[in-house]
């Protein structure tokens, strides 16, 4: 009789889930490891502001999940998870349709022995009137690409009408700040390709609206001050202490009744996990995040969770591990050992059973090759402020390290060189 193969199903091929599938797949192969994602290809989420601004081309950068599955030894199943029967150990997937609405795959159920939920997060509109209707979120590749096309249309319209273009970004965390800086640069670049009547210095107005007293409020004050200065130098208007009360088709208003005109509005003011997680029967919080313990276990012994979709205590001071790619990456590494032991039917030593988040610092890109941030000293635990070429190099290496985890050293190097060469023959911004 053939021994039962332990089936690990990982839902969500993002910063955490995909790295876990690739590493686990390399060890155990596609009979043991399945990855599910609603998309057909992967873009590293911290690059989405570049996709939205047109400085990163998804048709060149996207990594096919089927290709990764073949080379890293996991089975890829395309589909959106809608729910699960935790008693029967199976998840429910919706039908997958193509852009014309034709069914590619029917609705399916997928059985597991161990389930890992890594479905990330999306923007939280906090029930602000009009926000979900009129503001755009940059949570997925599809949304970022939709924004890019809207931006190109809005620029063409502004060029033809001579009216100027107002862009409002709500939320000055890393996403909002990086997007504002990238847009200022990319709109100026687009204008050089045939928009002779559009003068970015005169016609482009980007306003960054933040509820806290300073931008990047989760990061040290020195980073926030440097970023504020650079954004202002780029002509971006930064307003802090502003609570947005409503979003309309043509602008926003705050709790003090002030109006901000906007042809395009982006919402980047907080996150929540996908709502279906609260219906699974697992312990979740008000933001639909799954509550996990230090071993990333949920309230069901066969289900683990990681990344943005979890609430995980950090230390004893009531803090939680932040929703960041470096946390998702560390958690994937931690679960690799735990799941490997499960597949082998072994037990992990007790001291390997608790994950501790290590903050290595934060880097924020401000366009024009400028990056500011801090690196945490391994021994001192204190942050060291960095900017300039070294910060830029560290920022670029984060994306490369993610590719390295997925593709290995040789293919990452070939891809990086190929992209560098391709860039020489293409416009600085994607125009079509
Ligand atoms: C513009 C931007 C810039 C950022 N910059 C940084 C940064 O500089 N540094 C940093 O540390 N963090 C940054 N972040 C945050 C970082 O991207 C996230 O913390 C990280 O991607 C979370 O990883 P994850 O694996 O939990 O989820 P994700 O990477 O979001 O992946 C989730 C995956 O799940 C899939 N999925 C979702 N729902 C379903 C479903 N129902 N069924 C099947 N599949 C599903 C999605 O398609 C996606 O592939 C940034 C985020 C944004 C938006």
Image: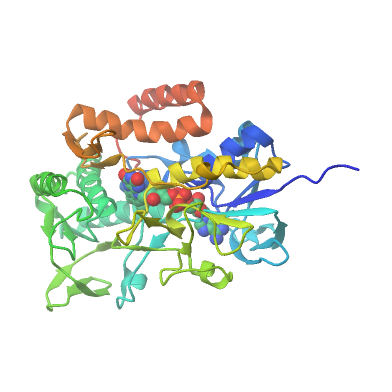
Residue at the farthest front position: 350
- As drawn, 14 above or below 247: above
Foreground of the two, 415 or 15: 15
Q: Which color scheme is applied?
A: rainbow
Question: Which quadrant: the C terminus?
Answer: top left
Q: Going by the image, does 352 lie left or right of 303?
A: left
**How far across and how far down the image is residue 7, in percent?**
71, 48
Q: Going by the image, does 29 lie left or right of 257?
A: right
Q: Which residue is at a point 57% across and 37% down the rendered structure image?
A: 22
Q: Which residue is at a point 40% across and 27% down the rendered structure image?
A: 419
Quadrant of the image occupied by residue 361 = top left
Foreground of the two, 363 or 228: 363
Question: Which quadrant: the N terminus?
Answer: top right
Quadrant of the image occupied by residue 382 = top left
Quadrant of the image occupied by residue 89 = bottom right
**How far across and how far down the image is residue 247, in percent?**
26, 73
Residue at the farthest right position: 1
Q: Which residue is at a point 31% across and 66% down the rendered structure image?
A: 135
**How far across and how far down the image is residue 339, in percent?**
61, 44
Q: How many marks?
A: 0
- Could one spot residue 199 in this view of the protein? no
- Could one spot residue 221 in this view of the protein? yes
Foreground of the two, 194 or 21: 21
**How far across and how far down the image is residue 142, in percent?**
45, 54
């Amino acid at each position: 009789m053939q021994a039962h193969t332990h089936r690990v199903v990982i839902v969500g091929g993002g910063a955490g889930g995909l790295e876990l599938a690739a590493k686990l797949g390399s060890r155990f192969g596609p009979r043991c490891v399945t990855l599910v994602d609603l998309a057909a290809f992967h873009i590293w989420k911290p690059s989405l502001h570049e996709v939205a601004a047109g400085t990163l081309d998804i048709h060149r950068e996207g990594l096919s999940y089927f290709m990764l599955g073949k080379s890293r030894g996991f089975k890829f199943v395309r589909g959106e998870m809608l729910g699960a029967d935790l008693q029967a150990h199976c998840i429910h997937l919706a039908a997958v349709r193509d852009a014309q609405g034709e069914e590619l795959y029917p609705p399916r159920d997928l059985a597991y022995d161990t389930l890992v939920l890594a479905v990330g997060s999306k923007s939280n509109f906090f029930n602000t009137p009009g926000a979900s209707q009129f503001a755009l979120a940059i949570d997925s590749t599809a949304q970022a690409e939709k924004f890019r096309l809207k931006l190109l249309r809005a620029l063409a319209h502004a060029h033809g009408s001579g009216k100027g273009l107002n862009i409002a970004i709500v939320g000055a965390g890393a996403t909002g700040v990086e997007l504002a800086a990238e847009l200022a640069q990319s709109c100026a670049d687009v204008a050089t390709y045939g928009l002779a009547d559009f003068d970015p210095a005169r016609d482009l107005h980007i306003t960054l609206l933040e509820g806290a007293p300073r931008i990047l409020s989760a990061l040290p004050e020195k980073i926030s001050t440097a970023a504020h200065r650079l954004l202002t130098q780029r002509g971006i208007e930064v307003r802090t202490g502003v609570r947005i009360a409503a979003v309309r088709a043509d602008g926003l208003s705050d709790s003090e009744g002030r109006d901000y005109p906007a042809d395009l509005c982006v919402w980047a003011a907080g996150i929540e996990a996908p709502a279906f997680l609260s219906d699974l029967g697992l312990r979740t919080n008000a933001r639909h995040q799954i509550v996990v313990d230090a071993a990333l276990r949920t309230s069901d012994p066969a289900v683990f969770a990681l990344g943005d979709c979890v609430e995980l205590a950090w230390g004893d001071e009531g803090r939680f591990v932040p929703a960041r790619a470096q946390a998702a990456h560390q958690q994937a590494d931690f679960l690799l050992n735990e799941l490997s032991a499960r597949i082998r039917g072994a037990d992990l030593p007790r001291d390997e059973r608790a994950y501790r988040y290590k903050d290595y610092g934060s880097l924020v890109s401000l366009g024009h090759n400028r990056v500011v941030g801090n690196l945490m000293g391994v021994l001192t635990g204190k942050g060291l402020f960095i900017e300039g070429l070294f910060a830029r190099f560290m920022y670029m290496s984060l994306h490369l390290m993610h590719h390295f985890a997925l593709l290995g050293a040789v293919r990452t190097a070939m891809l990086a060189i190929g992209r560098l060469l391709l860039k020489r023959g293409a416009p600085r911004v994607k125009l079509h």
